[in-house]
Image (cartoon, grey):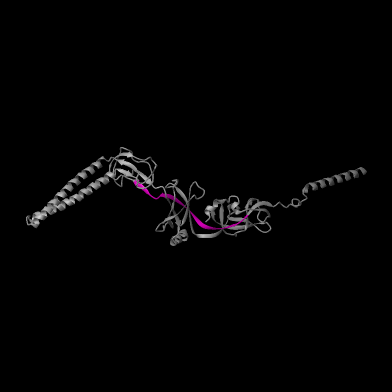
Amino acid sequence: MTLSRHRIAALTVAAALLAAGAAYTLLPASGGVAHAEGQPAAAAVDVAPALARTILDWQRYSGRLEAIDRVDIRPLVSGTLTEVHFKDGALVKKGDVLFTIDPRPYAAEVDRAAAQLAAAQARAAYTASDLARAQRLLSDNAIAKRDFEEKQNAAREAAAHLLAARAAQESARIHLGYTRITAPVDGRVSRAEVTVGNVVNAGAQTLPLTTLVSVSPIYAAFDVDEQTFLKSVNPARAAGTEVPVQLGLANEDGYSREGVVHYVDNRLDSNSATIRLRAVFDNHDGSLLPGLYARVRLGGGGPREAVLVDEKAIGTDQNKRYVLVLDDQHRANYREVTLGANLGPLQVIEKGLKPGEQIVVNGLQRVRPGSVVAPTVVSMDTAPQAVKTAAAALK
């Protein structure tokens, strides 16, 4: 019985020691109580004040590039093609010779016209001299009036034949010049559709020898809706100011080129409720080709003040967008926002946020709305992804 009491006492002491050891291991070495009490550590996040900037609203559209000048090169005289003076796809200058048609028949026509002109000049000179003699005889009544009138008519007829001969010679020279087919504008030629040795015919219905398109500047044509036209384009036209346009290609993320609206159609398409616009862009490097798809961004409506944040600071809650706004107690509060245009890495906030309010810009996924955070204040301009490439989109 006594032995049993000793064993019970020993077991009681051992249990107490185990409990004390377990309690010791639960206490942090620093003596803190946060983990012991079940409180999670504050998440470390970067925060930045919302920016206030003057911006220009942009509307996005799809368009196609068009050459300012497009010329189908056709022969103006018939004959045998004797030379092709360009390489397919080459750049040419206005006046460069592209093709040569056998000039010999047309050179012969020039010579024949020159001979006819010489004969007409001789005939005109003779009849003029004869008329002058008849005029002197008439004053002395030494010639019949009828004979004088015949000489007068002969002189007039010879003068008319002289004019016709001069015109025929000029026409022959023009046709001879047409045997050298030149570029009417600067641009890039397509391939030669007809090779040397083939006979070509003059006429608008004949197959073009090649096609020539201008390179720079170049147009981008696109259709805008009625509201955009009334809000952005029409007021600018009335004020005499240019409407800015930015252009990006299919393989580009942003908008690499800037231009202005060059042309507005004279009517609205009632079927699509759109109006055709055309913007002009510099293309000195020749990288823009007619027919390419283009992403177009149309600016207008005038500059305005807007709130901008790093797009990484925006969270998604089903069909809503939100940011986490810090209060004085470093608590991250849920705030629903309405988004506007995207300007590079910065996002316009139309509703829900004021300039200067501190929001979480990095570490959003580590924070629960309403929780306390450990903030590090950074500039919105240096927040992740909010680099200075956005400056190009800000006005």
232 above or below 193? below
Q: Residue furthest right?
A: 2
Measuring from the top left, give residue 196's x and y in whole percent. Answer: 32, 38
Q: Residue at x 56, y 53 (%)?
A: 346
**Left/right of residue 34 with respect to residue 224 in the rendered view:** right
The quarter of the displayed image where residue 372 is located: bottom right
Q: Residue at x 10, y 55 (%)?
A: 136
Measuring from the top left, give residue 159's x and y in whole percent. Answer: 17, 51
Q: Quick one: 24 or 117, which is closer to the camera? A: 117
Q: Residue at x 25, y 47 (%)?
A: 171
Q: Residue furthest top?
A: 197
The answer to whether residue 317 is seen in the rendering is no
- Segment tinted magenta in the rendering: 48-72
Q: Is residue 65 magenta?
A: yes
The answer to whether residue 392 is seen in the rendering is yes
**Left/right of residue 189 with respect to residue 46 in the rendered view:** left
Q: How many marks?
A: 0
**Left/right of residue 30 with respect to residue 11 in the rendered view:** left
Q: Main secondary structure of the magenta part?
A: strand
Measuring from the top left, give residue 325's x and y in whole percent. Answer: 63, 57
Measuring from the top left, give residue 11's x and y in whole percent. Answer: 86, 44
The quarter of the rendered structure image containing the N terminus is top right
Q: Is residue 111 magenta?
A: no
Q: Quick one: 167 or 354, which is closer to the camera? A: 167
**Left/right of residue 357 with respect to residue 393 in the rendered view:** right
Q: Residue at x 19, y 46 (%)?
A: 118
